[in-house]
Image (cartoon, rainbow, N blue to C red):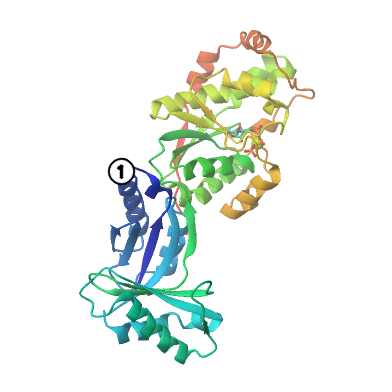
């Protein structure tokens, strides 16, 4: 049977003047993502996008899975196409929705007819198909107000389509409509979630990872690349910038007061991220920081970190509880990788007694002994760019 996907647009439909731009972006994201499965015809009618496979060998389960992780789509229905004839429609409903009809206790049929030359009205078609289905599946009751199953019929230009209840899509806005940002990606639980959350608002992501070999191992780096791969389905294309960070951390350890190690290190992370951001036309930085989680995430410490850069720093997790962050990490599939026990560079040279309220002027004074520009320049020169690809 010839399945197609009906993809309902979400928030985009609320956009006024920009709506066409948002919709075009969504269609091009959908086309690009589905193209690896084979040829699709993709078009939009009202606020629904249709994805029609152009050959029988296309894996539609996989197509549905890919669409479930595509931002900008509110819900997904898998529909069967058939001839525009009431009995062909009925036969399709019986066969295609057999499991759903057997599993439900109440149902109704809802028809839409954009092809006005179809000889029956929508109401007559619903009544006909509903009556016949009721006879074929006598355990069902008809409930027009609150049915467990709605059998949807759409009679369109080229064909009729039959589908059942839809499944929720990823929501959010299409990648590419929200600008571009550098996301600081560690191997922890938080930063994959913050990356996902900003991607969900349509932001194109450039992940940056600070790597302190040999204090952190190749396995720790691989873990970050694995997290990026898990985010790839949501974010679209990803190229991780791996910044060599060892020399900077050693310089801080050797020359700065221990109580400021972390906050000075974080200021270097921000400055290097800002350099990468500006080189790539990004408008913001993203971190997984969360108020009060650790000493470097008090309001005062965040202010000191912020003072190192001029770009806005987006912190989507700032006010969330850890439980809620973990729930998202589990939902998007990054949690199990995040809890693998490899060290992050933040846990190298951790001060025994970090200042929770570091005064900016003291931090600036402590930093003066370092040749920040030279250290940053050298790190940026040696960035490794790793394009993320799906393993399977
Ligand atoms: P996470 O779970 O994301 O590692 P965390 O609670 O462990 O966060 P920190 O280690 O203090 O917090 O880091 C705060 C934020 O700084 C991270 O969410 C991430 O955005 C960024 N960050 C920390 N370490 C790195 C790193 N090695 N490379 C890139 N970004 C990092
Ligand atoms: Mg961390």
Q: Quadrant of the N terminus?
A: bottom left
18 vs 183, left or right, is left
Query: Is residue 48 among what the camera can see?
Result: yes
Q: Quadrant of residue 385?
A: top left
Assess mark 1: CB under 8 A from ligand 1? no
Counting from the top left corner in percent of width and height, residue 383 is at 47, 30
Counting from the top left corner in percent of width and height, residue 145 is at 51, 72
Query: Is residue 391 among what the camera can see?
Result: no
192 vs 96, left or right, is right
Q: Is residue 93 above or below residue 384?
A: below
Counting from the top left corner in percent of width and height, residue 220 is at 62, 41
- Give whichever of 297, 242 is nearer the camera: 297
Q: Quadrant of residue 302?
A: top right
- Give whichever of 239, 292 is nearer the camera: 292
Q: Is residue 143 above or below residue 236?
A: below
Judged from this view, the residue extending furthest toward the left is 117
The residue singled out by tag 1 in the image is 21
Residue under the image location 47 percent in, 48 percent down: 172
């Amino acid at each position: 049977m010839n399945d197609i996907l009906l993809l309902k647009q979400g928030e985009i439909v609320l956009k006024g003047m920009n709506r066409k731009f948002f919709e075009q972006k969504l269609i091009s994201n959908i086309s690009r993502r589905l193209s690896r499965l084979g040829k699709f015809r993709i078009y939009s009618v009202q606020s629904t996008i249709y994805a029609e496979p152009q050959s029988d060998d296309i894996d539609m389960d996989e197509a549905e899975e890919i669409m479930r992780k595509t931002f900008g789509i509110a819900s997904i229905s898998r529909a069967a196409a058939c001839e525009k004839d009431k009995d062909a429609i009925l036969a399709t409903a019986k066969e295609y929705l057999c499991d759903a009809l057997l599993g439900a206790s109440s149902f109704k049929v809802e028809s839409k007819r954009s092809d006005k030359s179809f000889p029956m009205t929508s109401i007559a078609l619903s009544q006909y198909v509903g009556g016949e289905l009721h006879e074929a599946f006598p355990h069902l009751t008809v409930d027009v107000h609150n049915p467990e199953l709605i059998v949807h019929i759409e009679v369109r230009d080229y064909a009729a389509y039959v589908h059942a209840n839809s499944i929720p899509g990823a929501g959010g806005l299409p990648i590419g409509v929200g600008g571009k940002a550098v996301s600081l990606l560690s191997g922890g639980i938080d930063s994959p979630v913050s990356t996902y959350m900003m991607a969900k608002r349509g932001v194109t992501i450039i992940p940056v990872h600070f790597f302190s070999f040999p204090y952190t191992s190749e396995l720790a780096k691989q873990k970050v690349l694995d997290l990026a791969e898990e985010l790839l389905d949501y974010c679209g294309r990803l190229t991780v910038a791996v910044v060599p960070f060892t020399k900077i951390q050693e310089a801080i350890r050797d020359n700065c007061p221990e109580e400021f190690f972390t906050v000075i290190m974080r200021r270097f992370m921000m400055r290097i991220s800002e350099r990468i951001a500006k080189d790539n036309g990004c408008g913001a930085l993203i971190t997984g920081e969360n108020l009060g989680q650790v000493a470097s995430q008090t309001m005062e410490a965040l202010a000191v970190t912020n003072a190192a850069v001029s770009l806005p720093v987006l912190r989507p997790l700032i006010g969330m509880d850890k439980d809620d962050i973990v729930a998202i990490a589990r939902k998007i599939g990054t949690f199990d990788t995040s809890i693998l026990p490899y060290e992050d560079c933040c846990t190298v040279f951790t001060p025994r007694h970090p200042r929770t309220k570091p005064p900016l002027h003291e931090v600036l004074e402590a930093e003066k002994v370092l040749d920040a520009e030279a250290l940053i320049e050298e790190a940026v020169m040696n960035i490794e760019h790793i394009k993320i690809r799906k393993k399977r």
